[in-house]
Structure formats: structure tokens, C-alpha cells
Amino acid sequence: MTDLVVHPQAGGLLGTVAVPSDKSIGHRALLLAAIARGTSRIQGFSRGGDNLSTLAGLRRLGVRIDEVGATELRVTGVGLTGLAPPDAPIDCGNSGTTMRLMAGLLAGQAFTTVLVGDASLSRRPMMRVVDPLRRRGASVEGTLHGGGPELTAPLTIAPPSGRLGALSYDLPVSSAQVKSALLLSGLAADGPTVLREPALSRDHTERMLVAMGAPLAILDAGLTLEPGGWDARLEPLDLEIPGDISAAAFLLVAAFVVPGSSVTLRGVGLNPTRTGLLDIARDMAAPLTAEVGGNRAGEPVGDIAAVSGPLLAAQVRGDRVGRAIDEVCVLCALAARAVGVTRIEDAAELRVKESDRLAAMARVLRAFGVPCDELADGLLVEGVRRPLRAAVVDSGGDHRVAMTAAILGLTADGPSRIRDVDCIATSFPDFVGTLRTLGARLHTD
């Protein structure tokens, strides 16, 4: 296992950099290109571990994916019924998105597939996607977890007894992964798919499906996919994936909390279902500008500029948590340097991510000398204005916990060590190099 040693920052972080392309969009672009008719071109593909799991899985299903240079892919689509039986289980690695979306894609196929993952993914709950898939006639089995009703991987997806049926479903918790899996299954269903969420989750799948000609209606009351009368043909994609705002968040927060910093991030996706952290940062008086300057693949894109400044505590709950669910870890670093107590609620979903992120962040914050209390669905974080206490912490194999600990280390009173940081490669392979470009002193050990 690799450690990361982070030295206190003597001066500001300065510069203009790019971030990895959006892995959420990358997953979806690959999956939909695979079942399109024709050859799709995907530019700016991230080679993070999660996206590579989806790529490898599709190849195992018989999809030709040619790599053109470092970041461009050409995907030869096979149509809705052209996937081939895999010769072995599909390894989803650490990627919950790969496993859940693959489950939807494969639910209506005429062959059996087994989806497996690493130790972390094999503990994550899958009933949230398995239950609605079963309601429309899918045959999905998993491993009963803890003697209760929850299912975990491996998942075995067998052919349904007939065509998948119609589905009208209210998601109990807003989830882009579950929503996307059900839409993918609905492309081959005999009847409509009608979905409603308590609050809008990220909508990359919907935007892409509409652009590819799928019969999807997006209304205030929810989504309706009606395949009746459709020719079952998805047009190929030609897109450049925007920068990942979830990766950008770590660099933005670093700029906010390290005095004297001024950082600009180029070409970042600014989809409003993903910009909750920007709204929260503004509530905390963080100086930033974010302006849409174009469009990629139906997604608004622009540059974000951030400078350091005094921060104020905030109340974070509801819709903003949903639009920043992947950024709550690094939000804790922002709260650790704000004046007052930041209260984060409505984030119980974080207990079933790569780790229990609420418990993990409470542990990490306390190690750095930041007072923190756990709530059932969130955290209370009391800001500290003096330098944080240098710490030795373990990531627990969670990339977002590891990167957040590194940002906290920049404001500590001595060198800090973050253990087990190989996981960072799942989403931001050049995290260390990018911070070094901005002037940070850190190295792997």
C-alpha cells in the first residue's frame, strides 16, 4: 500500500489547470455507445479505475472499443440485442456505477451474466436496484447480507422468462445510478418506464438518451420512457466529455482554505444537478466565479476560479446535499476552516458508499484536531482557525476520504501522512501531480 506525505503549505496555491473528465458521464457514454447502431467517438475519456472497469466489462460482452491516442475512444455499437455472452464474470472493480448500470443493461438479455467486484464493492447494497428490476420481470440474484433482506454482489443476472414488463416506480431515495439502471432496462421492455424521485439526481443519462433519439419524456413529475412504436435504434455519439466537478471540488477547496491561493480550473462540467458544492461554498462566503462558456454533449461547461478568503459556517441539507453527494467529504475540509459550526444533514446515503463516509470523515477530522460529532444522517463540524494538527490517517480504501485528508494536510502544523492512497486512481489518477503543479509539496512513499 502506498502512503502520501503532505507538507504544510507555506504560500498560496497558484495556477490554471484542467481536471480529469467526468467519470459519471464517461460510464454512461460507454454503455450507451455500446448499444447504439454505428460508431461513436468519445473524446476526453478518463482512465481512472472506475471508468476502466466499465470499458473492460463491455469488451467482455463483445463490444469493440478502439483506443485512439491517450483519451479518445471509438466504440462500435452492437444495438440493443447485440451483446454477447461473457466468457467469465464481469469484474466491476470498485465501481458501484459499473455494477448497478450493468445490471440494468443486462436485465433483458438472453444470456446469464455474473457481476463481481472488489471487497469494498461486495459490501455495498444492491437491493435498491435489484428490487425494481425484479418488479419488471428481471431475474437477478445476489448474496444475502447479514441475514437480512439486503443483497450484495456477486450478482447473477439470468434471462427473464419473457420480455421485461412496464414499470411505474417511485424511488425511495434519489439515485442517479438506480434511475439510470431502470432506464437502460426500459429500452428493451414491453411497455413504458415511469420514474419519480424525491428530488432530482444527476441527469446525465437522460440528456444523453434524448440526444441519441430515445423516446424519453422529461417532465416536472418525473420521467417516462415509452418504447412502443420506437425503432429501438440509438444514434451513435460524438462527444467530448467535460471536466469532472467532483475532481475539481478538491482543488477548489484547497484554494479556499490555503491563504494566498488563486486557482482556475478549465472546462469543468457545470450541470446544475452537480453544482451543489458551488452553492454551498457561496453560502460559506468562499470567493469563486463559475460561468458557463459552452456546451459538450448536452452538458454546460465553463471555467471556475477560486481564491482564498475568510469562511463562514453553514447549514447544509436537502437538495444541496443531493447535488453535492460526492463532495460532502471535501466539504468537511471547508467546514474545518470556517468560523462556527457547520451542520450537514440528509446525507445518510454516505454510510453505504466505498466506506461509511460519515464515520470516516469524523475520524479524519478528529485526527487533525477538528471537533466533530456524528449525526445519524450527517455531521457537526466546528471550524478551527489555527493550523490543524499534523496527523497520520488511513483512507480506508476510499478515494474521496484520501483526497480530503490531503487537503486538510495542506493547512496542518507539520507533515501529515495519509495511508493507503492507491484508491485515488479510481477517480483522479494525477491528483498528486496536479496539486504539485499548483505549488503544493506532497509525495508518495
Image (cartoon, rainbow, N blue to C red):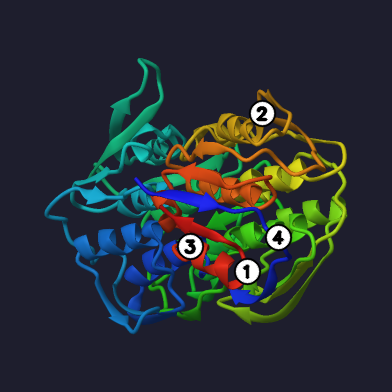
Q: Nearer the viewer, mark 1 or mark 3?
A: 1
Residue beneath disc 4: 10
- 234 lies above or below 155: below
| 3 or 2: tag closer to the N-terminus | 3
Q: Residue at x 57, y 61 (%)?
A: 441
Query: Which residue matches tag 1?
Result: 439
Q: Position of residue 249 (x, y in %)?
A: 65, 58
**In the orientation shown, which residue stands out farthest toward the top?**
147
Which amino acid, by three-letter code, is at mark 1?
Answer: Gly
| Mark 2 neighbour density, 10 Å: few (under 14) some (14–19) many (20 or more) | some
- Amino acid carrying label 3: it is Lys
Q: Which is in the foreground here, disc 4 or disc 2?
A: 4
SS for tag 2? loop
Q: Are marks 4 and 2 in contact (CB under 8 Å)?
A: no
Q: Are marks 4 and 1 in contact (CB under 8 Å)?
A: no
SS category of the residue bearing label 3: helix
Q: Earlier in the sequence, mark 1 or mark 2?
A: 2
Instruction: Tell which of 255 and 186 is nearer to you.
Output: 255
For the residue pair 223 and 301, the one nearer the viewer reads as 301
First reached walking from the N terminus: tag 3 or tag 4 = 4
